[in-house]
Image (cartoon, rainbow, N blue to C red):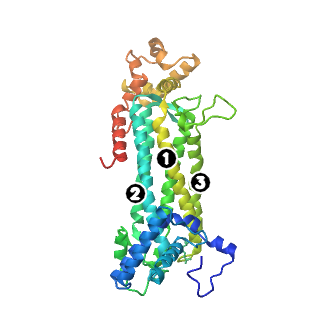
């Protein structure tokens, strides 16, 4: 494609340099935003008398036809175009003649690309947020199904205290709910139109930036034109929000991997989300969870790449900034795919509550409750803690568990022990007694699930 900027030079680039410089192969995905932005620009120019109304109409009609032809595949991207902005302008001029050349009045590709990326990411955020809500919904449904399945809660990956699987799952739901909030915050700060900043210094034309911004659904405009074209904070903010979401998915994925191992067997993944081994017939591998865990590093890498690209850049636009898009798009695609596979994987997994309970029945995870029992009977907690530790050591030495130790043995340790002890240290009681708000007790878990459901279905 001939260069629209030819003039100062003849625009004849060395072929390799031209390919190196071109961004159409990745920025073409912003065609919808680019064209929508241009239509608003033409309207704004006409409203200020900068463009003749008939010219603005011809431009709008031309742009609309380009959009629909791209949508239905009648028009395809020219790989030799420099970028999406040049491509659209060039096709427009081919279609409507010299009038098309008036569109680029009072703007620059520098503010145009800043606008397109904000608009694109705004759309992406709506899409990703819907996917996170679908995941929260799946998590909440599994939590509800497993609200009374008791398993060991771990600290240091050592059995610590009994919790319900519903409570454990809801913890992830809370994380994803915050991820949604972070995306919402990033979108709020992204809601600023840079268009009209032009190359860097604004323009001599009497434009109406606020009208153009409102035509495009922006709440406000950037207040400094140099900042308007240089700012990529919005992309960084989003990449960090996405990185945190990936980190949450990855922790969850890690648990899915070991929960589905033979050593744990707390869950069985649906066949649709597992693979077999080409050599070991017994294998059912949690590849999807592993890939999600693996792809997390990619998204962190995208964030680091963009931070590094920007760190040494003088104001205002520099071509380095073209590198923002591949990192951003990769993170968007990766997170989007991970959510697409993760939500149904969680929804369809089968839980094995008996195995969970068996695991909870060993490992003395009711030892805290034993100490609490003694404390309720009047012993100071520190002394109760020590005595309970001694009883655990006794059980280990005698290959038994707290539930099976006879009362006479308990009473040899302390006369405070009575028959009601066994009820108090039963796993069900251990869970049900944890009535503090946010604890693993049934009322709290029900409230958590309800909260998550409301986040998943804000419109209800
Ligand atoms: N393709 C460019 C980018 O993505 C568009 C802006 C180019 N501006 C310029 N003056 N060369 O950043």
Closest to the observer, 159 or 227: 227
The part of the image, by quadrant, that contains residue 158 is top right
Q: Say if 164 sits above or below 333 in the image.
A: above
Closest to the observer, 113 or 298: 113
Distance, label 1 to label 2, CA atoms, is 20 Å
**Percent x, y of residue 229:** 49, 75
Mark number, residue 278: none
Lower position in the chain sequence, tag 2 or tag 3: 2
Q: Which residue is mark 2?
A: 184
**Percent x, y of residue 277:** 66, 34
Distance, label 2 to label 3, CA atoms, is 23 Å
> Quick one: SS at disc 3?
helix
Which quadrant of the frame does ligand 1 lie within?
bottom right
The answer to whether residue 223 shows anywhere in this view is no
Give the tally of numbered discs.
3
Lower position in the chain sequence, tag 1 or tag 3: 3
Q: Say if 227 sits above or below 384 in the image.
A: below
Query: Is residue 140 rendered to the left or right of residue 279?
Result: left
Mark number, residue 298: 3
**Percent x, y of residue 307:** 56, 64
The answer to whether residue 96 shows anywhere in this view is yes
Query: Looking at this rendering, what residue extends furthest in the left direction?
Result: 460
Of the two numbered discs 1 and 2 in the rendering, the one whose residue sits closer to the viewer? 1
Closest to the observer, 444 or 30: 30
Q: Which residue is mark 1?
A: 340
Distance, label 1 to label 3, CA atoms, is 17 Å
């Amino acid at each position: 494609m001939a260069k629209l900027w030819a003039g100062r030079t003849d625009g004849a680039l060395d072929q390799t340099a031209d390919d190196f410089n071109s961004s159409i192969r990745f920025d073409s995905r912003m065609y919808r935003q680019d064209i929508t932005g241009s239509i608003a620009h033409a309207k704004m120019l006409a409203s200020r008398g900068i463009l003749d109304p008939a010219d603005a109409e011809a431009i709008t009609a031309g742009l609309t036809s380009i959009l629909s032809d791209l949508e239905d595949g009648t028009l395809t991207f020219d790989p030799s175009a420099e970028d999406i902005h040049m491509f659209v302008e060039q096709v427009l001029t081919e279609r409507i003649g010299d009038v098309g050349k008036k569109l680029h009045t009072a703007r620059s590709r520098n503010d145009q690309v800043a606008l397109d990326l904000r608009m694109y990411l705004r759309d992406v955020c709506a899409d990703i947020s819907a996917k996170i809500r679908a995941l929260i919904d799946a998590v909440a449904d599994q939590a509800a199904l497993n609200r009374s399945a008791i398993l060991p809660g771990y600290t240091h990956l050592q059995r610590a205290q009994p919790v319900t699987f519903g409570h454990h799952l809801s913890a992830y739901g809370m994380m994803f709910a915050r991820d949604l909030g972070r995306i919402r915050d990033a979108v709020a700060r992204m809601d600023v139109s840079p268009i009209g900043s032009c190359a860097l210094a604004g323009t001599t034309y009497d434009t109406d930036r606020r009208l153009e911004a409102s035509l495009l659904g922006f709440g406000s405009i950037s207040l400094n034109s140099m900042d308007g074209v240089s700012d990529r904070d919005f992309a960084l903010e989003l990449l960090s929000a996405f990185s945190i979401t990936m980190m949450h998915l990855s922790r969850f994925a890690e648990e899915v991997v070991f929960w589905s191992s033979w050593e744990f067997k707390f869950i069985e993944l649906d066949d649709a989300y597992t693979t077999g081994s080409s050599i070991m017939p017994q294998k059912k591998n949690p590849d999807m969870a592993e890939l999600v865990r693996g792809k997390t590093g990619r998204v962190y890498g995208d964030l680091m790449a963009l931070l590094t690209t920007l760190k040494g850049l003088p104001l205002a636009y520099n071509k380095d900034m073209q590198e923002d898009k591949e990192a951003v798009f990769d993170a968007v695609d990766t997170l989007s795919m991970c959510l697409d596979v993760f939500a149904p994987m969680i929804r369809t997994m089968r839980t094995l509550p008996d195995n969970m309970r068996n695991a909870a029945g060993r490992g003395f995870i009711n030892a805290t409750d034993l100490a609490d029992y003694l404390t309720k009977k009047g012993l100071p907690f520190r002394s109760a803690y020590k005595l309970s530790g001694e009883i655990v050591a006794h059980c280990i030495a005698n290959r038994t568990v707290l539930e099976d130790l006879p009362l006479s043995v308990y009473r040899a340790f302390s006369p405070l022990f009575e028959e009601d002890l066994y009820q108090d240290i039963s796993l069900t009681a251990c869970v049900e007694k944890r009535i503090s708000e946010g604890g693993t007790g049934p009322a709290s878990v029900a409230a958590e699930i309800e909260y998550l459901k409301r986040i998943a279905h804000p419109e209800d």
